[in-house]
Image (cartoon, helix red, strand yellow):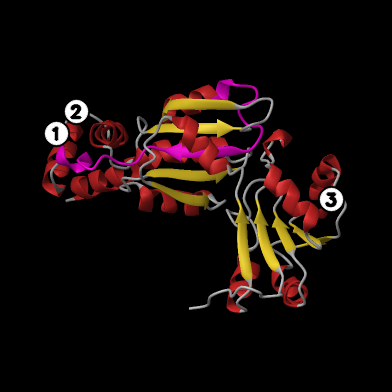
Amino acid sequence: MQVIKPGDTRGTLYIVATPIGNLEDISARAVSVLSGVAVIAAEDTRHSGRLLQHLGINKPLVALHDHNERGRVQNILDQLLAGADVALISDAGTPLISDPGYVLVREARVEGLRVSPIPGSCALIAALSAAGLPTDRFLFVGFLPAKRSGRRTALEELRKETATLVFYESPHRILDTVADIAETMGEHREIVLGREITKTFETFYSGGATQVLATLTDDPHGSRGEFVVMVRGAEKAESSLMAGALEVDRLLSLLMEELPIKKTAKIASSLTGLGKNELYQRALDLKDS
């Protein structure tokens, strides 16, 4: 265990949250810290330069992003060890939350340097606070895989999670992601999407997965901006309706007597909350046997 002793003359690494949209969300403490440090490590120096200019802060900027972090860490550590205070900021929100900085913070702690958080905006917390979904337990997953196969696999693995699920998603994948949630978790699974949070066109979409998908598709702005995707967790008693595999099989068998397999899987998914793909495959197995 490392303890920072009083009188340590080495610098402090400040992890500073910046606005996710509305520039008025910057805290007075964040402005004070950014004004007082020797250097600011930023994910995108051009982007952060505009924020600093708005705040009237003129400090040396060094780029620290996913592609160069490991190569830049030692230089920043050297400055901290020499007594200079350094601030780490990302393009928006709280650094390290799906943003660069882990390697730097980890190495600073290994060196026994003081790392101090300056709290502020965070898209996932802002979205959750306004979503109307349970927040006593939530699981932040960051970005889902970009490819459909990987995304669907990840969603299948999370389907039975009872905590509220939170993802970040880009505008060009949002429709596909919502469609995959409906397919894997059930078309009635409650979801809430926060778009452009704190910005001029801030919008929240809520309802069953297929309902939200239809609303997004009809909205001319539905595929614009950055999204926070929140999915209500599975009910703890979700499987009590179909107490086990035998009950699920019985339901599928009864439905297949009157309906095609695809329709059978869709109805069974709505009734049980189980994934449509999983039920479709099980129905095929039952038919073959």
The amino acid beneath tag 3 is Arg
- Residue range of the region highlighted in magenta in the rendering: 216-241
Q: Is residue 55 magenta?
A: no
Which dot, 1 or 3, sits closer to the camera? 3
Q: CA distance from mark 3 to mark 2?
A: 62 Å
Visible residue check, residue 176: no
Secondary structure, mark 3, is helix
Q: Nearer the viewer, residue 171 or 106?
A: 106
**Label at residue 46:** 3
Q: Position of residue 211 (x, y in %)?
A: 44, 24
Residue located beneath label 2 in the image: 258
Dots 3 and 2: beta carbons under 8 Å?
Answer: no
Which dot, 2 or 1, sits closer to the camera? 1
Q: How many C-alpha atoms fall within 10 Å of the one at disc 2: few (<14), some, or many (≥20)?
A: few
- 209 above or below 164? above
Q: Is residue 233 magenta?
A: yes
The amino acid beneath tag 1 is Leu
Q: Position of residue 50 (x, y in %)?
A: 84, 44
Q: Quadrant of residue 61?
A: bottom right
Residue located beneath label 1 in the image: 254
Q: Nearer the viewer, residue 101 or 242?
A: 101
Q: Position of residue 12 (x, y in %)?
A: 68, 66
Left or right of 192 in this view: 201: right
- 69 above or below 173? below
At 49% across and 54% down in the image, what residue appears?
Answer: 150
The amino acid beneath tag 2 is Glu
Secondary structure, mark 2, is loop
Left or right of 252 in this view: 188: right
Q: Quadrant of residue 180?
A: top left
Q: Nearer the viewer, residue 97 or 152?
A: 97
Left or right of 45 in this view: 197: left
- 75 above or below 209? below
